[in-house]
Image: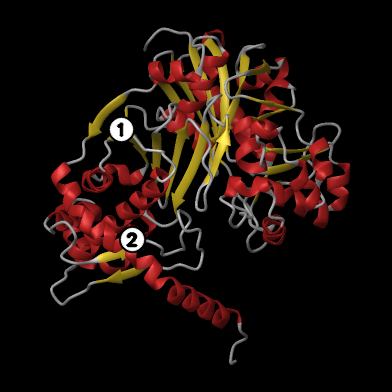
């Protein structure tokens, strides 16, 4: 084990807390995670108990130090990341007044619609389109309208990361990462958009938000004595301002310079990148002023359905591949990838539109749906599987094309998540978009990102960019093949033509099916 000093990153995810201890070079010493419960009291609701958060953190911190053989004195700094738009109401004694409303909770859909209807200039941050019911502002409105006693008596309305920072230090301060990307804070235009808050009747919440909005890595305060005793740490250890989990993950992948994108994969694709100048357009969230790096702008885009489509095909239509995988003692995806590798580029005329659950970027169309066209009797499951992956890669490239229209040229995709294990899939991303795909040594991006902020707060590094250069290490890079890129162009153009031609029909079908499902039985 490398010598100290060490830094601690605390990752508050949806399913639990993960504590990681790293040396100054970004080498992990130990990880320890503890799961917690999410409760769903009504359809569309999701809540968690902050006391369970805390007891889980206490367990994870102590176990990490014990397992890693690290003493409290060797921890030079601490920082955190957490889910965002996870909203709490705190009383005058800093106690939570109700369970936390989780980021995935969509009870505030009516409030979100009313925000969108204002047409306020601040809506540039959600691409001038629909406002997500997941965001923090509509949830604060819901509290005021549906639980007025709690709202009126709340001294603070805050986000999960704000709560955790306060619990650690006793100080109330928010991260510019959270304030900008979930509450419309824009330092370039004076902070919180009072016109928007006034238009929806919740300007008084500005008095309940944590007073200071700080940059990432800025020291909020020292670890409180009683808290240090609980966590097995040292009183006064500097605690640096943290970030949203996905953004901390982007930092942990080394996204600290304009033009670099993090491609965070899983059931969906999330793309987070840095720009030198602000860009705003339909289908993108941001670009957020100073949200990750002072003087830069952060843009976010995404594909709703990616890995989930691949899983759908595997689970529903790949019985032969599953049987072959069981016989050989390998994963079903290994067999499907082998089948797809035998199929030529373009899947012999198949195009898949990856909008199975709507489109987030660049069209912002929740009524769009998936399309498979070009089928012939010669197509096999291997053809369809390859066409699905190609369609996902075309969807990513369609986002890049929209970004290039704003003079933003993605220079490198640094990747994490389950699909990154597929060499075929990642090579396809590189070839379709003609960009290299980088893979970092540490896959625990959010925890490493939080640890990087801790290193800045501890004074080990002067800024986040320097921390990234020393703590994030690219293990390998997949380079695009220019010949394959040129061959993909024809199929990419056919993909781009599909949505405009099918849009009205898809939307009409989605509305029809939604009406059928909502109608009483027998009608």
State the residue position of label 2.
496
Q: Residue at x 37, y 46 (%)?
A: 400
Q: Report whether residue 253 is seen.
A: yes
The image shows residue 459 at horizontal and vertical percentages of: 54, 9
The image shows residue 203 at horizontal and vertical percentages of: 82, 44
The image shows residue 34 at horizontal and vertical percentages of: 53, 36
Front position in the image: 320 or 25: 25
- Residue 466, image quadrant: top left
Residue 278 lies left or right of residue 428; in this view the side is right
Residue 199 lies left or right of residue 314; in this view the side is right
- Residue 477, image quadrant: top left
**In this view, the mark in front (2 or 1):** 2
State the residue position of label 1.
439
Q: Measured along the vertical axis of the image, is residue 228 above or below residue 138?
A: above
**Along the polypeptide, which appears first: circle 2 or circle 1?**
1
Within 10 Å of disc 2 (Cα), the crowding (few <14, some 14-19, many 20+) is some
Identify the image quadrant of the N terminus.
top left
Front position in the image: 389 or 59: 389
Front position in the image: 105 or 378: 378
**Coloring scheme of the render?**
secondary structure
Q: Residue at x 49, y 78 (%)?
A: 508
- Is the residue under label 1 in contact with that under label 2 (CB below 8 Å)? no
Q: Residue at x 36, y 28 (%)?
A: 442
- Dot 1 falls on a residue whose secondary structure is strand
Within 10 Å of disc 1 (Cα), the crowding (few <14, some 14-19, many 20+) is some
């Amino acid at each position: 084990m490398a010598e100290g000093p060490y830094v601690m990153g605390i990752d508050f995810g949806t399913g639990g807390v993960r504590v990681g201890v790293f040396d100054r070079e970004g080498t992990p010493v130990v990880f320890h995670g503890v799961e917690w419960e999410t409760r769903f009291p009504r359809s569309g609701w999701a809540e968690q108990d902050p006391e369970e958060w805390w007891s889980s953190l206490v367990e994870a911190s102590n176990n990490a130090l014990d397992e890693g053989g690290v003493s409290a004195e060797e921890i030079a700094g601490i920082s955190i990341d957490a889910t965002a738009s996870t909203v709490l109401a705190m009383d005058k004694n800093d106690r939570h007044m109700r369970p936390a409303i989780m980021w995935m909770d969509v009870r505030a859909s009516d409030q979100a619609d009313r925000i969108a209807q204002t047409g306020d200039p601040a809506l540039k941050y959600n691409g001038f389109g629909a406002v997500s019911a997941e965001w923090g502002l509509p949830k604060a409105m819901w509290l005021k309208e549906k639980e007025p006693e709690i709202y009126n008596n709340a001294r603070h309305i805050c986000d999960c990361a704000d709560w955790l920072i306060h619990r650690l230090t006793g100080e109330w301060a928010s991260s510019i990462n959270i304030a900008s990307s979930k509450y419309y804070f824009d330092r370039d235009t004076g902070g919180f958009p009072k016109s928007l808050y006034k238009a929806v009747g919740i300007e008084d919440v500005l008095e309940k938000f944590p007073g200071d909005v700080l940059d990432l890595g800025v020291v909020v305060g020292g670890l409180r004595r009683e808290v240090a005793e609980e966590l097995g740490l040292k009183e006064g250890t500097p605690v640096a301002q943290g970030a949203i989990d996905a953004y901390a993950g982007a930092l942990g992948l080394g996204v600290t310079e304009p033009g670099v994108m993090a491609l965070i994969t899983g059931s969906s694709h999330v793309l987070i990148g840095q720009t030198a100048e602000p860009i705003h357009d339909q289908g993108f969230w941001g670009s957020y002023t100073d949200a990750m790096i002072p003087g830069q702008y952060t843009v976010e885009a995404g594909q709703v359905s990616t890995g989930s489509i691949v899983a759908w095909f595997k689970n529903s239509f790949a019985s032969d591949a599953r049987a072959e995988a069981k016989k050989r003692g390998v994963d079903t995806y290994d067999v499907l990838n082998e089948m797809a590798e035998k199929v030529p580029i373009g899947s012999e005329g198949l195009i898949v539109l990856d909008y199975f659950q709507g489109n987030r970027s660049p069209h912002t169309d929740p009524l769009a749906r998936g399309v498979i066209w070009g089928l012939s009797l010669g197509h096999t499951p291997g053809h369809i599987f390859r066409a699905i992956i190609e369609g996902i890669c075309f969807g990513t490239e369609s986002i890049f094309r929209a970004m290039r229209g704003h003079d933003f040229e993605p220079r490198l995709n640094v990747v994490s998540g389950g699909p990154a294990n597929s060499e075929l899939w990642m090579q396809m991303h590189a070839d379709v978009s003609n960009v290299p795909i980088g893979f970092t040594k540490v896959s625990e991006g959010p925890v490493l990102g939080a640890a990087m902020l801790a290193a800045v707060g501890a004074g080990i590094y002067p800024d986040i960019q320097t921390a990234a250069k020393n703590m994030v290490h690219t293990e390998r890079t997949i380079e695009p093949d220019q010949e394959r890129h040129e061959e993909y162009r024809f199929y990419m153009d056919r993909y781009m033509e599909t949505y405009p031609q099918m849009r009205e029909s898809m939307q009409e079908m989605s509305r029809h099916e939604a009406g059928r499902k909502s109608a009483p039985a027998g009608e």
